[in-house]
Amino acid sequence: MYKYKKDFPIFKNTKFYNKDLIYLDNSATTQKPQIVIDEYAKFYENFNANIYRGIYRLSEEATSMYEGARTSIAKFINAKSNEIVFTRNTTESLNLVVLSFAKSILKKNDLVVLSVVEHHSNIVPWLILQKEIGFRIEYIDINKESFELENIDKYLELKPKIVSITQVSNVTGVENNIKEIIRKAHLKGAFVIIDAAQSVPHKKIDVKDLDCDFLAFSAHKMLGPVGIGILFGKEDLLERMNPVLGGGEMILSVDQDSCTFKEAPFKFEAGTVNFADAIVFKKSIEYLDGIGMDNIEKYIKELSGYTYENLSKVNGLKIYGQKNNSGIYSFSLKAVHSHDIASFLDEDNIAIRAGHHCAQVLMNRFSVYALSRVSIYIYNTKQDIDNLCISLSKISDLF
Ligand SMILES: Cc1ncc(COP(=O)(O)O)c(C=O)c1O
């Protein structure tokens, strides 16, 4: 896998403090390979026109590229094209399900099950809707030793209408057995929404095999552009949902008193959509497919194990999680504040994340305000991890 690093110009160009960049904040966003960056120029230099609207060749070319991107992304997760809605990011995808699907089926005394490891994007939209409707929310707890979600059975006994959980925690890196959770939830008649922001970049995801009702992810966390997210929804569920945003291109007809909508997914894509980024995202998918998602999964698993073992050797470092296959680890180091750790590491041009990781419910569960987090991707190497641990040991020695 080491050979792929040279495809990413940022590692040649960016030498803050005269040091090579060691980028370990991939859960926040990933770097972009040259062919993805070039795709922007190619599109704007040759094909730029607003899609759907133009009765001329250029617009038709751009439209077919946009729909081609939808088809590629559908294939990537084994969905049908009309089950793929383009959004801005995972957050918007989850908000769309909450504000349209969930809002249409939830009543005052209904129950929604989330988990304590959720990112704010899978908590806050629910809290906003709860204010309006007044349904109950239960949070699946984690086992504080294994960091895995508790058995879901007792939560399903409460007969939730919806279960909405993350596949991989962006804090602990622990993967939930969502296939089993989905199977059990369906047996009890609940719909299941999956936040796959941290899993789709790392392994082959097959929505048919998982049988999830909805699944959300972001392009920018998988070598793609910022500003494009995906909502997968089962065809029949998308069809019965109402749009949240109204405007151009999502309608069939409008008069002064009423309007009718296009079919899914078009009724959810109001106004001029982010067609350029969707088209560029297709290039990222091709790049990942070229490497092979199985190879990526294998490599990240191996480097993740190496990261865990070496972080564990740093004096005074405590990992909030177990060895995992995602390469995401959050930790404290003695009593040093996570912002100070990040600043110290920055002097060695090592980029990590510090703070609450948009997971304050989990921070409360851990009784901490903030943690430091490293997260790896395909261009990271064992050398990166060695250098990280040397720098962390230097910090440890100071305190
Ligand atoms: C698990 C998880 N869910 C959702 C999100 C939100 O993603 P975005 O900011 O792209 O909407 C993130 C971002 O880090 C995440 O890690």
Image (cartoon, grey):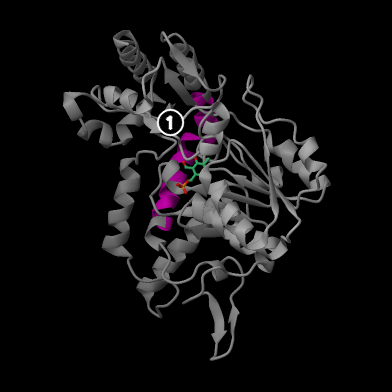
Residue 344 horizontal side relative to residue 82, left or right: left
Residue 232 horizontal side relative to residue 58, left or right: right
Q: Quadrant of the C terminus?
A: top left
Q: Is residue 142 magenta?
A: no
Where does residue 203 sit, x and y in percent of width and height? 56, 35
Q: Tell me which secondary structure the magenta stretch mostly adopts.
A: helix
Q: Quadrant of the N terminus?
A: top left
Q: Is residue 91 above or below residue 359?
A: below
Q: Amino acid at mark 1?
A: Tyr
Residue 395 horizontal side relative to residue 89, left or right: left
Q: Which residue sits at x=80%, y=44%? A: 158
Residue 169 horizontal side relative to residue 248, left or right: right
| Quarter-of-image position of residue 379 | top left
- Badge 1 local density, few (<14 within 10 Å), some, or many (20+)? many
Where does residue 196 sit, x and y in percent of width and height? 57, 43
Q: Is residue 232 above or below residue 380?
A: below
Q: Which residue sits at x=54%, y=78%? A: 251
Q: Is residue 298 magenta?
A: yes
Question: What kind of element bears circle 1?
Answer: loop
Q: Is residue 78 above or below residue 4?
A: below
The boundaries of the magenta stretch are: 278-300
Q: Which residue sits at x=41%, y=70%? A: 272
- Viewer-closest of 246 and 115: 115
| Quarter-of-image position of residue 65 | bottom left
- Viewer-closest of 379 and 168: 168
| Residue with the mark numbered 1 | 377
Q: Which residue sits at x=26%, y=36%? A: 10
